[in-house]
Amino acid sequence: MTEQLLATKTAAVVYNPIKVDIDALRSAVGAEQRAAGWGETLWFETSVDDVGQEVTRQALEAGADLVIAAGGDGTVRAVAEALRGSDATLALLPSGTGNLLARNLKLTLDDMAHSLNVAFTGDDRAIDLGVVDIEREDRSRDRHVFVVMAGMGIDAKMIKNTDDDLKAKAGWAAYVDAIVKSLRDPNELHLRFQLDGGPRKRATVHTLIVGNCGSLPANILLMPDAVVDDGRFDLLLMRPGSALGWVRVWFKVAWTNGVVRRTKAGKALAGERRNDGDLHYETGTRFVARLSRPEEIELDGDAFGEATAFNTWIEPGALTVRVPRSADGGTDSVSAADTSAPAVAEDAESRVN
Protein backbone atom coordinates (compact mmCIF):
# COMPACT_ATOMS: atom_id res chain seq x y z
CA MET A 1 0.00 0.00 0.00
CA THR A 2 2.83 2.39 0.90
CA GLU A 3 4.65 1.61 -2.35
CA GLN A 4 1.48 2.33 -4.34
CA LEU A 5 1.05 5.65 -2.55
CA LEU A 6 4.65 6.68 -3.22
CA ALA A 7 4.33 5.73 -6.88
CA THR A 8 1.54 8.28 -7.31
CA LYS A 9 3.89 11.10 -6.34
CA THR A 10 5.35 13.13 -9.18
CA ALA A 11 8.33 15.45 -9.26
CA ALA A 12 9.04 18.14 -11.83
CA VAL A 13 12.39 19.71 -12.60
CA VAL A 14 12.40 23.36 -13.63
CA TYR A 15 15.89 23.97 -14.93
CA ASN A 16 17.96 26.76 -16.40
CA PRO A 17 19.78 25.16 -19.36
CA ILE A 18 22.70 27.57 -18.96
CA LYS A 19 23.30 26.56 -15.34
CA VAL A 20 23.06 22.75 -15.46
CA ASP A 21 24.43 19.75 -17.31
CA ILE A 22 21.08 18.38 -18.43
CA ASP A 23 22.32 14.89 -19.34
CA ALA A 24 23.97 14.39 -15.95
CA LEU A 25 20.94 15.85 -14.22
CA ARG A 26 18.48 13.56 -16.00
CA SER A 27 20.57 10.52 -15.09
CA ALA A 28 20.86 11.51 -11.43
CA VAL A 29 17.16 12.39 -11.12
CA GLY A 30 16.19 9.07 -12.70
CA ALA A 31 18.24 7.13 -10.17
CA GLU A 32 16.80 8.97 -7.16
CA GLN A 33 13.27 8.82 -8.54
CA ARG A 34 13.41 5.06 -8.96
CA ALA A 35 15.04 4.50 -5.56
CA ALA A 36 12.29 6.53 -3.87
CA GLY A 37 9.51 4.80 -5.81
CA TRP A 38 8.16 7.98 -7.40
CA GLY A 39 6.45 8.30 -10.76
CA GLU A 40 8.16 9.56 -13.91
CA THR A 41 9.68 13.02 -13.42
CA LEU A 42 8.43 15.93 -15.55
CA TRP A 43 10.90 18.32 -17.18
CA PHE A 44 10.50 22.02 -17.88
CA GLU A 45 13.15 24.35 -19.32
CA THR A 46 13.30 28.05 -18.49
CA SER A 47 14.00 30.70 -21.10
CA VAL A 48 14.69 34.41 -21.42
CA ASP A 49 10.95 35.02 -21.80
CA ASP A 50 9.97 32.67 -18.98
CA VAL A 51 12.51 32.47 -16.17
CA GLY A 52 10.40 29.95 -14.29
CA GLN A 53 6.93 31.15 -13.36
CA GLU A 54 4.94 29.86 -16.34
CA VAL A 55 6.69 26.49 -16.63
CA THR A 56 6.20 25.97 -12.89
CA ARG A 57 2.49 26.61 -13.32
CA GLN A 58 2.51 24.05 -16.12
CA ALA A 59 4.20 21.59 -13.77
CA LEU A 60 1.51 22.15 -11.17
CA GLU A 61 -1.23 21.70 -13.75
CA ALA A 62 0.43 18.42 -14.75
CA GLY A 63 0.13 17.20 -11.16
CA ALA A 64 3.61 17.81 -9.72
CA ASP A 65 3.81 17.32 -5.95
CA LEU A 66 7.42 18.49 -5.84
CA VAL A 67 9.18 21.06 -8.01
CA ILE A 68 12.98 20.92 -8.12
CA ALA A 69 14.47 24.31 -9.00
CA ALA A 70 17.74 23.68 -10.85
CA GLY A 71 19.32 27.05 -11.48
CA GLY A 72 20.45 30.23 -9.82
CA ASP A 73 18.68 32.55 -7.40
CA GLY A 74 16.49 33.93 -10.18
CA THR A 75 15.15 30.47 -11.00
CA VAL A 76 14.48 29.72 -7.34
CA ARG A 77 12.63 33.01 -6.87
CA ALA A 78 10.53 32.49 -10.00
CA VAL A 79 9.58 28.94 -9.01
CA ALA A 80 8.68 30.09 -5.49
CA GLU A 81 6.50 32.83 -6.98
CA ALA A 82 4.52 30.28 -8.97
CA LEU A 83 4.29 27.88 -6.00
CA ARG A 84 2.73 30.57 -3.78
CA GLY A 85 -0.74 29.39 -2.81
CA SER A 86 -0.18 25.79 -3.91
CA ASP A 87 0.37 22.61 -1.88
CA ALA A 88 3.50 21.62 -3.79
CA THR A 89 6.95 21.50 -2.22
CA LEU A 90 10.06 23.30 -3.47
CA ALA A 91 13.37 21.43 -3.63
CA LEU A 92 16.65 23.17 -4.38
CA LEU A 93 19.46 22.05 -6.66
CA PRO A 94 21.93 24.94 -6.12
CA SER A 95 23.38 25.79 -9.52
CA GLY A 96 24.17 29.50 -9.48
CA THR A 97 26.60 32.07 -8.13
CA GLY A 98 24.88 33.08 -4.91
CA ASN A 99 22.58 30.16 -3.99
CA LEU A 100 21.21 32.48 -1.33
CA LEU A 101 18.23 30.47 -0.06
CA ALA A 102 20.26 27.26 0.03
CA ARG A 103 22.97 29.00 2.05
CA ASN A 104 20.47 30.38 4.55
CA LEU A 105 18.86 26.96 4.95
CA LYS A 106 22.36 25.50 5.38
CA LEU A 107 21.85 23.08 2.50
CA THR A 108 24.75 21.34 0.79
CA LEU A 109 26.14 23.21 -2.22
CA ASP A 110 27.85 21.72 -5.30
CA ASP A 111 26.68 18.17 -4.57
CA MET A 112 24.04 17.10 -7.08
CA ALA A 113 23.62 13.58 -5.71
CA HIS A 114 23.02 14.78 -2.16
CA SER A 115 20.66 17.59 -3.20
CA LEU A 116 18.53 15.21 -5.26
CA ASN A 117 18.47 12.62 -2.49
CA VAL A 118 17.15 15.33 -0.16
CA ALA A 119 14.57 16.32 -2.79
CA PHE A 120 13.09 12.80 -2.95
CA THR A 121 13.58 11.63 0.65
CA GLY A 122 13.91 14.73 2.85
CA ASP A 123 11.53 16.47 5.23
CA ASP A 124 9.25 19.40 4.48
CA ARG A 125 9.89 22.72 6.18
CA ALA A 126 7.53 25.69 5.98
CA ILE A 127 9.31 29.02 5.59
CA ASP A 128 8.11 32.58 5.19
CA LEU A 129 7.64 34.26 1.85
CA GLY A 130 8.11 37.95 1.12
CA VAL A 131 5.61 39.57 -1.23
CA VAL A 132 6.04 43.00 -2.78
CA ASP A 133 3.82 45.26 -4.86
CA ILE A 134 6.03 47.56 -6.94
CA GLU A 135 4.67 50.82 -8.28
CA ARG A 136 6.27 52.21 -11.43
CA GLU A 137 6.65 55.76 -12.67
CA ASP A 138 3.56 55.36 -14.88
CA ARG A 139 1.56 54.31 -11.75
CA SER A 140 1.28 50.71 -12.92
CA ARG A 141 1.91 47.96 -10.40
CA ASP A 142 3.27 44.46 -10.50
CA ARG A 143 3.47 41.86 -7.73
CA HIS A 144 6.40 39.57 -7.04
CA VAL A 145 7.80 37.43 -4.23
CA PHE A 146 11.23 37.18 -2.67
CA VAL A 147 12.64 34.39 -0.55
CA VAL A 148 15.79 36.16 0.63
CA MET A 149 15.61 39.95 0.37
CA ALA A 150 14.39 43.01 -1.50
CA GLY A 151 16.64 46.03 -1.71
CA MET A 152 17.11 49.54 -3.02
CA GLY A 153 20.13 51.80 -3.10
CA ILE A 154 23.69 50.58 -3.37
CA ASP A 155 22.85 46.86 -3.51
CA ALA A 156 20.33 47.37 -6.34
CA LYS A 157 22.77 49.61 -8.22
CA MET A 158 25.51 47.02 -7.69
CA ILE A 159 23.39 44.34 -9.32
CA LYS A 160 22.54 46.63 -12.24
CA ASN A 161 26.25 47.45 -12.68
CA THR A 162 27.40 43.82 -12.62
CA ASP A 163 28.72 42.52 -15.92
CA ASP A 164 26.85 39.28 -16.70
CA ASP A 165 29.72 37.82 -18.73
CA LEU A 166 32.18 38.51 -15.93
CA LYS A 167 29.76 37.04 -13.41
CA ALA A 168 29.56 33.83 -15.45
CA LYS A 169 33.36 33.56 -15.48
CA ALA A 170 34.34 34.92 -12.08
CA GLY A 171 31.27 34.16 -9.96
CA TRP A 172 30.71 36.27 -6.85
CA ALA A 173 34.00 38.15 -7.40
CA ALA A 174 32.34 39.91 -10.35
CA TYR A 175 30.39 42.01 -7.86
CA VAL A 176 33.55 43.73 -6.59
CA ASP A 177 33.82 45.97 -9.65
CA ALA A 178 30.09 46.66 -9.48
CA ILE A 179 30.35 47.64 -5.81
CA VAL A 180 33.09 50.15 -6.61
CA LYS A 181 30.95 51.71 -9.35
CA SER A 182 27.93 51.86 -7.06
CA LEU A 183 29.85 53.52 -4.22
CA ARG A 184 30.81 56.33 -6.60
CA ASP A 185 27.15 57.17 -7.10
CA PRO A 186 26.43 60.18 -4.85
CA ASN A 187 22.66 59.81 -5.04
CA GLU A 188 20.87 58.79 -1.87
CA LEU A 189 17.40 57.41 -1.32
CA HIS A 190 14.88 59.95 -0.05
CA LEU A 191 11.79 58.17 1.17
CA ARG A 192 8.63 58.44 3.19
CA PHE A 193 7.75 55.17 4.88
CA GLN A 194 5.48 53.39 7.32
CA LEU A 195 6.29 50.22 9.26
CA ASP A 196 3.46 48.00 10.49
CA GLY A 197 0.93 50.82 10.31
CA GLY A 198 2.97 53.00 12.68
CA PRO A 199 3.77 56.69 12.33
CA ARG A 200 4.81 57.96 8.92
CA LYS A 201 8.49 58.84 8.80
CA ARG A 202 11.05 60.30 6.42
CA ALA A 203 14.57 59.03 5.87
CA THR A 204 17.60 59.61 3.69
CA VAL A 205 19.70 56.47 3.25
CA HIS A 206 22.24 54.88 0.94
CA THR A 207 20.67 51.43 1.13
CA LEU A 208 17.35 49.95 2.22
CA ILE A 209 16.91 46.18 2.54
CA VAL A 210 13.90 44.13 3.60
CA GLY A 211 15.22 40.68 4.42
CA ASN A 212 13.68 37.29 5.04
CA CYS A 213 17.19 35.80 5.38
CA GLY A 214 20.45 37.37 6.47
CA SER A 215 23.42 35.48 4.98
CA LEU A 216 25.24 36.34 1.76
CA PRO A 217 28.23 34.68 0.07
CA ALA A 218 31.78 35.46 1.25
CA ASN A 219 30.78 34.90 4.90
CA ILE A 220 28.74 38.12 4.95
CA LEU A 221 25.98 38.09 7.56
CA LEU A 222 24.08 41.22 6.65
CA MET A 223 21.15 40.67 9.00
CA PRO A 224 22.34 38.63 11.99
CA ASP A 225 18.90 38.25 13.57
CA ALA A 226 16.91 37.38 10.43
CA VAL A 227 15.07 34.06 10.72
CA VAL A 228 13.50 32.42 7.70
CA ASP A 229 10.43 31.14 9.55
CA ASP A 230 9.67 33.64 12.32
CA GLY A 231 6.81 35.36 10.49
CA ARG A 232 8.68 38.67 10.30
CA PHE A 233 11.17 40.44 8.05
CA ASP A 234 14.27 42.36 9.11
CA LEU A 235 14.60 45.91 7.84
CA LEU A 236 18.03 47.49 7.33
CA LEU A 237 18.58 51.20 6.72
CA MET A 238 22.19 52.07 5.92
CA ARG A 239 23.63 55.58 5.79
CA PRO A 240 27.35 55.96 6.48
CA GLY A 241 28.07 59.67 6.68
CA SER A 242 31.73 59.49 5.66
CA ALA A 243 34.54 57.24 4.49
CA LEU A 244 35.09 56.29 8.12
CA GLY A 245 31.41 55.40 8.31
CA TRP A 246 31.85 52.92 5.46
CA VAL A 247 34.79 51.37 7.31
CA ARG A 248 32.60 50.96 10.40
CA VAL A 249 29.82 49.38 8.31
CA TRP A 250 32.21 46.93 6.71
CA PHE A 251 33.70 46.01 10.10
CA LYS A 252 30.26 45.37 11.59
CA VAL A 253 28.98 43.33 8.67
CA ALA A 254 32.12 41.39 7.75
CA TRP A 255 33.68 40.91 11.20
CA THR A 256 31.14 41.41 14.00
CA ASN A 257 28.23 39.82 12.14
CA GLY A 258 30.12 37.52 9.79
CA VAL A 259 32.58 36.07 12.30
CA VAL A 260 31.93 37.01 15.93
CA ARG A 261 28.16 36.53 16.02
CA ARG A 262 28.24 33.11 14.36
CA THR A 263 28.95 31.39 17.69
CA LYS A 264 27.13 31.54 21.03
CA ALA A 265 30.27 32.79 22.75
CA GLY A 266 30.71 35.43 20.06
CA LYS A 267 27.14 36.64 20.44
CA ALA A 268 27.65 37.00 24.17
CA LEU A 269 30.90 38.88 23.55
CA ALA A 270 29.37 41.23 20.98
CA GLY A 271 26.35 41.93 23.16
CA GLU A 272 23.01 43.15 21.87
CA ARG A 273 22.84 44.56 18.37
CA ARG A 274 22.77 48.35 18.64
CA ASN A 275 21.55 50.83 16.05
CA ASP A 276 23.69 53.83 15.23
CA GLY A 277 24.00 56.49 12.56
CA ASP A 278 25.53 54.04 10.06
CA LEU A 279 23.24 51.04 10.42
CA HIS A 280 19.66 50.92 11.68
CA TYR A 281 17.71 47.67 12.09
CA GLU A 282 13.99 47.08 12.63
CA THR A 283 11.66 44.09 12.30
CA GLY A 284 8.10 43.99 11.05
CA THR A 285 5.47 42.34 8.90
CA ARG A 286 4.59 45.16 6.47
CA PHE A 287 6.63 48.04 5.08
CA VAL A 288 5.34 50.72 2.72
CA ALA A 289 7.59 53.35 1.15
CA ARG A 290 7.41 56.09 -1.46
CA LEU A 291 10.56 57.47 -3.07
CA SER A 292 11.24 61.05 -4.14
CA ARG A 293 12.22 59.76 -7.60
CA PRO A 294 12.32 56.42 -9.41
CA GLU A 295 14.97 54.13 -7.90
CA GLU A 296 16.43 50.75 -8.83
CA ILE A 297 14.99 47.78 -6.92
CA GLU A 298 16.31 44.23 -6.66
CA LEU A 299 14.73 40.98 -5.52
CA ASP A 300 16.92 38.04 -4.49
CA GLY A 301 19.86 39.43 -6.42
CA ASP A 302 18.06 40.22 -9.68
CA ALA A 303 17.34 43.71 -10.99
CA PHE A 304 13.63 44.56 -11.23
CA GLY A 305 13.78 47.99 -12.82
CA GLU A 306 12.85 51.25 -11.15
CA ALA A 307 10.18 51.81 -8.52
CA THR A 308 8.57 54.99 -7.27
CA ALA A 309 6.90 53.19 -4.35
CA PHE A 310 6.51 49.70 -2.97
CA ASN A 311 4.43 47.83 -0.43
CA THR A 312 5.92 44.63 1.00
CA TRP A 313 4.74 42.11 3.56
CA ILE A 314 5.58 38.67 4.94
CA GLU A 315 3.35 35.63 4.46
CA PRO A 316 4.25 33.28 7.34
CA GLY A 317 4.92 29.67 6.41
CA ALA A 318 3.70 30.23 2.84
CA LEU A 319 6.43 28.22 1.10
CA THR A 320 7.27 24.58 1.80
CA VAL A 321 10.89 23.62 1.14
CA ARG A 322 12.48 20.17 1.17
CA VAL A 323 15.35 19.88 3.66
CA PRO A 324 17.51 16.95 4.87
CA ARG A 325 15.70 14.44 7.04
CA SER A 326 16.32 15.10 10.71
CA ALA A 327 18.39 12.63 12.73
CA ASP A 328 15.40 11.44 14.76
CA GLY A 329 13.33 10.81 11.65
CA GLY A 330 10.94 13.63 12.51
CA THR A 331 10.24 16.80 10.64
CA ASP A 332 11.43 20.36 11.10
CA SER A 333 8.31 21.83 9.56
CA VAL A 334 7.08 25.11 11.01
CA SER A 335 3.36 25.56 11.49
CA ALA A 336 2.08 28.14 9.05
CA ALA A 337 0.05 31.05 10.30
CA ASP A 338 -2.64 32.72 8.19
CA THR A 339 -1.00 33.05 4.78
CA SER A 340 -3.78 34.92 3.02
CA ALA A 341 -2.42 38.02 1.30
CA PRO A 342 -4.29 41.27 0.84
CA ALA A 343 -6.33 41.14 -2.38
CA VAL A 344 -4.47 44.22 -3.59
CA ALA A 345 -1.99 46.00 -1.38
CA GLU A 346 -3.28 49.32 -0.13
CA ASP A 347 -2.33 52.33 -2.19
CA ALA A 348 1.19 53.32 -1.22
CA GLU A 349 0.40 56.99 -1.76
CA SER A 350 -2.50 56.88 0.69
CA ARG A 351 -0.43 54.96 3.22
CA VAL A 352 2.67 57.14 2.98
CA ASN A 353 2.00 60.85 2.52
Image (cartoon, grey):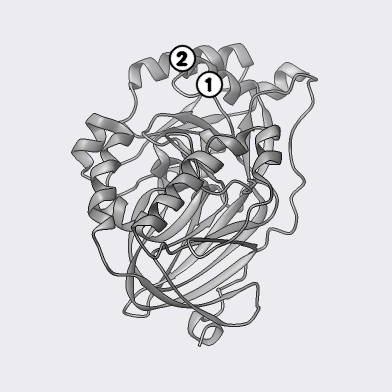
Identify the residue shown where x is 52% and y is 83%: 352
- Give yes or no for contact between labels 2 and 1 (Cβ–Cβ under 8 Å): yes
**Number of other residues with Cα within 10 Å of mark 2, as a class: few under 14, some 14 to 19, many 20 or more:** some
Disc 2: which residue: 28
Where is residue 270 shown, x and y percent of the image?
64, 43
Secondary structure of residue under mark 2 = helix
Q: Amino acid at mark 1?
A: Leu
Residue 349 visible within the image: yes
Instruction: Say left or right for 155 vs 30.
Output: left
Identify the residue shown where x is 55% and y is 15%: 32
Q: How many marks?
A: 2
Instruction: Say left or right for 257 vs 231.
Output: left
Distance Cα–Cα, label 2 vs label 1: 8 Å
186 or 15: nearer the eye? 186
Where is residue 291 shown, x and y percent of the image?
40, 77
Instruction: Say left or right for 285 vs 150.
Output: right
Disc 1: which residue: 116
Where is residue 316 shown, x and y percent of the image?
68, 54
Identify the residue shown where x is 39% and y is 65%: 241
Instruction: Say left or right for 47 vs 309.
Output: left
Where is residue 269 shown, x and y percent of the image?
67, 39
Above or below, 261 against 42 in this view is: below
22 or 199: nearer the eye? 199
Q: For residue 184, what is the image quadrant?
A: bottom left
Q: For residue 264, what is the image quadrant?
A: top right
Identify the residue shown where x is 58% and y is 30%: 106
